Image (cartoon, rainbow, N blue to C red):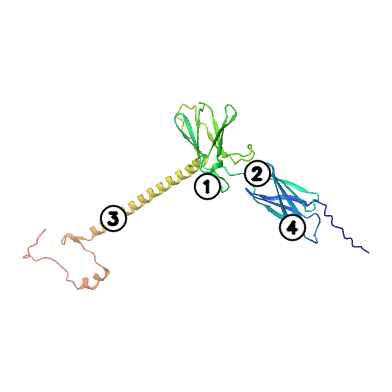
Amino acid sequence: DYVVVKMIPDNRLPPRHLHSVHTGKTFAVIKWESPYDSPDQDMLYAVAVKDLVRKTDKIYKVKTRNSTVEYTIKKLEPGGKYHVIVQLGNMSKESSVKINTVPLSAPDALKIITENDHILLFWKSLALKESNFNESRGYEIHMFDSLMNITAYLGNTTENFFKVSNLKIGHNYSFTVQARCLYSGQMCGEPATLLYDELGTGEDSSAAKSGRSTDVAAIVVPVLFLLLVTLGIGFVVLYMRHRRLQNSFTAFANSHYSSRLGSAIFSSGDDLGDEDDEAPMITGFSDDVPMVIA
């Protein structure tokens, strides 16, 4: 014997298993399950997105009958912090999750050029690879003194270079450049870091080169050297073959040279054979025929 029991759906329950599937710079994909399995009608969800940095709220509505719901929240800011709340439209119990979007990338090709009494930091514009970055936002520069164990904020700029002065001899410095932080330093870009450690060596200070440039030079120089060695060996082989062919031809020509005609005689295979048999054989010279010796 058995009995069938049908549970009454409780629309006051919260959505289940709310979590973030994927986050980008300006969007986030969230996923959850309905409060109970196999809904028999469309369910209206309210998705509230609270910006923890700007202190603003946005509410989106999602209507579906699926047991598993996947939703993409758009128009977010890089490096932002958000609190997402999902509940049924009848204001039932809620489920929540916190999301941090991906910050802006670090500037590329950060390098140092040394002048007489200062250095210049240079880097590529971040707008070349980040469509969400506006040059008017600018960059901020920090410096870390490893000897004093102090980090200093040097300032910000909307240019792609920055002048640094009053560096102390014998100190090692690390410089970082990143998209300027917004809202009291809560929304920043990834920093690009460069070590400058050539002061106090007793030599002229020179620009510190990035690890990428050093790696490229370490690969290019040996390859160019191998190419030059290969070309040199090829020229030597060709020269030796040319000399060998020239010597062989000279020896062959000398073996066929006729001093009487003053030139070399080359004959094909057709010239040999019966005609040589028909030519009269010279047996000697008559006493009355003068012999001329050239």
User: Please, what is the three-letter code of the amino acid marked with disc 4?
Assistant: Lys
Mark 1 vs 4, N-terminal side:
4
- Please tell me which residue is depicted at 24% across the width and 70% down the height of the picture: 271
Mark 3 vs 2, N-terminal side:
2
Tell which of 248 and 128 is nearer to you.
128
- Please tell me which residue is depicted at 49% across the width and 41% down the height of the picture: 213
What is the crowding at mark 2: few (fewer than 14 residues within 10 Å), some, or many (at least 20)?
A: many
Residue of label 4: 63
Q: On screen, 142 above or below 37?
A: above
Observer-side mark, 3 or 2, equals 2
Residue of label 2: 80
User: Please, what is the three-letter code of the amino acid marked with disc 3?
Assistant: Gln
Residue of label 1: 128
Element type at mark 2:
loop
In the rendered image, residue 166, in percent from the top left (x then y), is placed at 50, 27
What is the crowding at mark 4: few (fewer than 14 residues within 10 Å), some, or many (at least 20)?
A: few
The answer to the question of whether label 1 and label 4 lie on touching residues, with beta carbons closer than 8 A, is no
